[in-house]
Amino acid sequence: MASIFSRIVNGEIPCYKIAEDDRYFAFLDINPLAKGHTLVIPKKETDYIFELDDELLAGMMVFAKKVALAIEKTVPCKRIGIAVLGLEVPHAHIHLIPINSLGDINFSNPKLKFSSDEFSALAGEIVKNLDL
Ligand code: AMP
């Protein structure tokens, strides 16, 4: 069965989309640690990020960089932290998280709540700042 992220890519499950090209897709994390918390995935469904072939993995980081710079322009923060866990969803992904201090990227922290309108507005702002 397709992963939840493949179903997002295929449009079967809604998301707050940030960016897409032929190989990668980025969307807001629905349970964010910080405003602007975004996930970057390869469209090709692979569980473990280090099972991706070298070229696809390298390209994913370049795609993530463009998304991160747009988030950084949108959400005031010191920088965009990156994390890879993959303990919940078996489809490789990079977390991009606006941070100001070490504690901001602790996955044990309570997640933030936003309304659908707030998520949509934020995604729209980040998209405006994208330079793909
Ligand atoms: P992990 O696999 O541990 O890296 O965590 C998976 C991440 O995916 C979590 O931060 C979830 O909040 C996020 N997530 C799960 N389902 C969705 C979804 N439908 N839309 C956006 N984010 C999701």
Image (cartoon, helix red, strand yellow):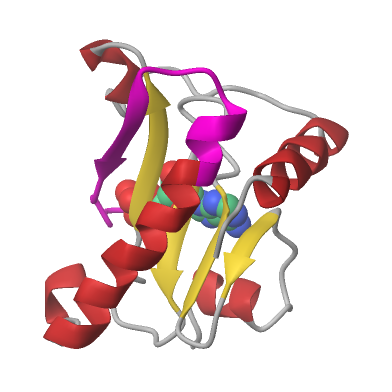
Q: Position of residue 64 (x, y in %)?
A: 38, 58
**Viewport quadrant of the C terminus:** bottom right
User: Image check: 8 left or right of 122?
Assistant: left
Of residues 121 and 32, the one nearer the viewer is: 121
Q: Position of residue 68 (x, y in %)?
A: 43, 45
Residue at x-position 71% and y-position 53%:
16
How many marks the image carries: the answer is 0
Of residues 10 and 59, the one nearer the viewer is: 59
Of residues 41 and 7, the one nearer the viewer is: 41
Residue at the right extreme of this rendering = 117
Of residues 43 and 31, the one nearer the viewer is: 43
Residue at x-position 73% and y-position 39%:
125
Q: Quadrant of residue 58?
A: bottom left
Residue 89 seen in render? no
Q: Position of residue 89 (x, y in %)?
A: 38, 61
- Range of magenta residues: 70-89
Q: Where 97 sits versus 8, above or below?
A: above
User: Image check: 60 left or right of 52?
Assistant: right
Residue 112 seen in render? yes
Q: Quadrant of residue 118?
A: top right
Q: Is residue 80 magenta?
A: yes
User: Image check: 95 left or right of 132?
Assistant: left
Q: Position of residue 49 (x, y in %)?
A: 20, 70
Residue at x-position 44% and y-position 18%:
77
Residue at the front extreme of this rendering = 131
Residue at x-position 31% and y-position 29%:
107
Q: Where 9 sits versus 76, above or below?
A: below
Q: Is residue 116 magenta?
A: no
Q: Where 100 sits versus 113, above or below?
A: above
